[in-house]
Image (cartoon, helix red, strand yellow):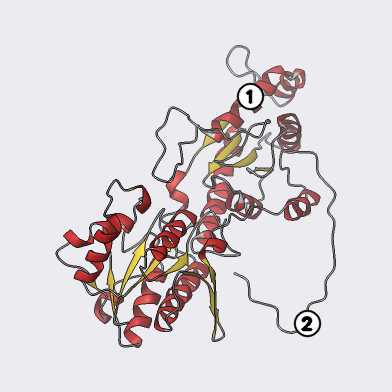
Amino acid sequence: MEKIGIITSGGDCGGLNGVIKGAALTALHKGMQAYIIPNGYAGLYNLVDIAKLTELTADRIEAIDVFVAGSEAGNSRVKVSKIKDDKKYDRIKEGLKKFGLDALVIAGGDDTGSVVVDLSAQGIPCVHAPKTMDLDLMPYSVGGDSTINRIAQQLHDIKTTGRTHNRIIVMEVFGRYAGHTAFRGGVAADVDAILIPEIPVDFDVLYKVVRDKFIKRIENSDVHAGTATVVVAEGLRDASGNELVDMSSEPDSFGHRKLIGAGKYVVKQIEDRIKADPEIKAFMKRTGQFVAGVYEIPEVRDLRPGHLVRCGSTTPVDSNFGLEVGAGAVELISQGVFGVTMVSYQAGKLEYMDVKEAIVQRLVSPADVALYETLGVCFGRKPEANKVDAVKVTGTPKRVY
């Protein structure tokens, strides 16, 4: 192995530049050359038509800042098997041959990993570096910590607006099928309720919790000021367990349709109950807020930070993990190990697993939810018993990000 190509695919997030830098520096250390293949799988497919690739020399690597989110290599959402070209794999191989690239380091999530499986089956040597801000792959993937930090900070900050205007705030965040980032970000921001795809929501339960906390805070305040905060994962399911999908939208190359707006859906559910609640009018009058025909019920506002939770800066955890799995991917390539996903590279031990196993979706554990319900967080259901098994660990516990 003398030359490798580095690809980042799917959505952007913190830690991708760490993967690129870790892979490039390790390649340089081993006397190999590393090149950026721009714009994800679209760039890989069009490689044969690209005039020149950027080589990651020592000086060029120096310009890549692991503290910065996003990807120096660029991303795209392209599923190679869906490309309408019967000779697409031959075209990709011709592009690799054109630049003398012996193997690929590919950073991405489950969709990206499925393409790694596909490319490997076509005899294209590649190693997968796990990346997803949704945290729904393995115990840890690049991007999760950075996103959770941004969600927690934004939830914390929005409380000042909520308290100033005595509003109930509902913030919708990314996490289509799994609620890890909403869960962990919400816990860190000390929100009142966390709604995730794993748990169908009973809106009567949610409303009572939010209403009671909202009213209590305002009535206990010497200036009658207070707020309640709800964070909801975009992939929230309705009471029947159905995903809130816009069926009129065109699916992308991986089959995903646009979601219709979980935040707005939750706001509507809360508003409907506020309007029908006979206690609200009395509460508004007791706290000096009621104005007939003008301001009779509290406002419920939705907020959708969208890509703001995956951009900007990278946390130290993601910077470290990105560097490690990038370096580990090149180590595997140098040992002739392909078609696998990097897991960790710590204390001189390089761990990897089959890509098909790595991209199996990992959801929020019910046991974790039950724990935080005992701590007072509402998950849109009646709290369930928290069952605890105490286990003694021997030796040195495995480091977990």
At mark 2, the secondary structure is: loop
Q: Which residue is mark 2?
A: 394
Which residue position holds label 1?
Answer: 271
- Vertical placement of 24 versus 362: above or below? below
Q: Position of residue 21 (x, y in %)?
A: 37, 74
Q: SS of the residue at dot 1?
A: helix
The first of marks 2 and 1 along the sequence is: 1
**Does residue 38 appear anywhere in the picture?**
no
Identify the residue at horizontal 44%, vertical 65% (top origin): 15
Please, what is the three-letter code of the amino acid marked with disc 2? Thr
Q: Is residue 330 left or right of residue 90?
A: right
Question: Which of these two is toward me, 291 or 366?
Answer: 366
Q: Quadrant of residue 395?
A: bottom right
Task: Tell me the kind of residue under disc 1.
Answer: Glu
Q: Is 62 placed above or below 81 here?
A: below
Name the image quarter holding the N terminus: bottom left
Q: Residue at x 33, y 69 (%)?
A: 6
Front in this rendered view, residue 179 or 275: 179
